[in-house]
Image (spheres, helix red, strand yellow):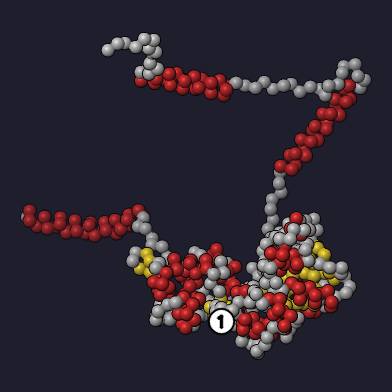
Amino acid sequence: MVKAFNKKESKRMTCHKKYKIRKKVREHNKKLAKTLKTAVTKKKKKGDGHVPNMAPFKEELLLEAMAQTDMKKEVKLKNKKKSPLVVTKQDTSEISKTVSSSTVSYQLTVSQCDVLLWVIDVRSGYECFCDEMFSEILKNDKTVIFVLNKIDLVPLAVLNRWYTFYSKKAPTFVIKSTQILLSDCEQIIPAVKQILSRFGGAKPLLSHLKTSYTEETKVGVIGGPKVGKSCVISTLLKFCGRTKAKKTTQTKLGDNLKIVTVPGLMDIEYKGVLNILVNLDRYMNVPAEVLSALAASISKADAMYQFTLPEYDHPEGFVAALAVRYNIFYDKKPDHSGVGRLLLKQLRDHKLKFYVDCEESGSGELPAEITADMSKFIFTGQALKIDSSEINIVIKTREKKKKSNEMDVEEGMESGSDEDLECSDGDMDASDEEMA
């Protein structure tokens, strides 16, 4: 073969040379790091305030500057030394509790406002109401208007019964609130019509407020936890084409109406399903106990229809039947905790619709004005009926098995040592007899 002319040298490198270069680079980087650590930054000497020597009263000016710096140092030291915390118990009756920045105690809203909108969750109406608080508000010469929220999660017959129950006590209105927020630009854009179609019930409520109160009045919103107070405020503001004011806590609804945008939280103790929804994070740790308590307050026919279950023993076999229905097993056994978590998530996401029926009120119907405005939001299907508004959840404490410690082993050894000594004494006596 003929050799190629002008053949370039290969760029290949031996492993010995390659590893040697890497080693040298590593050593060089280490040296740089050491020099950076050992390098000491020279501190600049503080001047005397740039006062020239020829200036009159130089010494007096420098003394004043030194005194000012000493004063600043003393103030810094005082701020660093924090006073010890003193914990004192406060009476809940006298002082109002503030749970978060978005809510205020209902007593504060009662003192500020003239008209109070009491928001009630229709799914469990008894839990959201308190007779003592209602009588206290009436004693202060305040007018109360009940607002039934979350009507799209309850059948129409149940809604009619709750409406008649609350309309006997005070004027009652129905609303379907929304959580969508309006921006400033959406007040002008025609896309507001689509947003307005997502909620309803604000028109008859606002017309009632405007007609009945001609003078300047403040409207406040109160209610228990997780009832939808802030959503009701946002729906009323959206219907008027307004947004929440950033600097102030009041916004105009009309010429003479002002609404307080911070709702008032009522300290109502829930004892039923709403208690589970409010304390959902805590009950997620014990889902099987919650599910067994719910099974006791549900009828067998409703459970079989709602969850499409076959024949089973109620309420003991309710959890096992649900595990078979949803195919949730652990070690080839029905996973009770897994089924409980699934149902709690369905309750949280409004996928499982439930209600507590009103037994005290008679038969009644919603007015024509409200039904015309809320016809598209009324729920026509069926939901899970819970018999009682109080659910007793029994949480069993599981005792952990104690591990055998070294101390227990030593005690056992000590107790057995006496027996061993007795045995050894007997053996010695026997050996002496044999020797004789």
Residue located at (60% from left, 21% from top): 39
* Residue 171 or residue 177, whichever sits in front: 177
Q: Indicate the quadrant containing the C terminus: top left, top right, bottom left or bottom right.
A: bottom left
Q: How many marks?
A: 1
Residue 110: x and y in percent read 78, 71
At 30% from the left edge and 58% from the top edge, which residue is drawn? 412
Residue 140 in view of the camera? no
Q: Residue furthest right?
A: 56
Q: Residue at x 85, y 27 (%)?
A: 63
Tell which residue pokes out farthest to the bottom in this image. 362
In the picture shown, does residue 336 fall above or below 57? below
* Residue 36 drawn above or below residue 211: above
Q: In front here: 18 or 189? A: 189
**Element marked by disc 1:** loop
Task: Judge from the rendering whether residue 116 lies leftward or rightward of residue 14; answer left or right.
Answer: right
Pointer 1: what residue?
Answer: 388
Quadrant that contains the N terminus: top left
In terms of image quadrants, where is residue 362?
bottom right
The residue depicted at 81 percent of the width and 22 percent of the height is 48
The percent coordinates of residue 379 (x first, y second) are 60, 77
Closer to the camera, 141 or 249?
A: 249
Q: Give the image location of residue 233, x and y in percent.
A: 73, 66
Residue 354 seen in the figure? yes
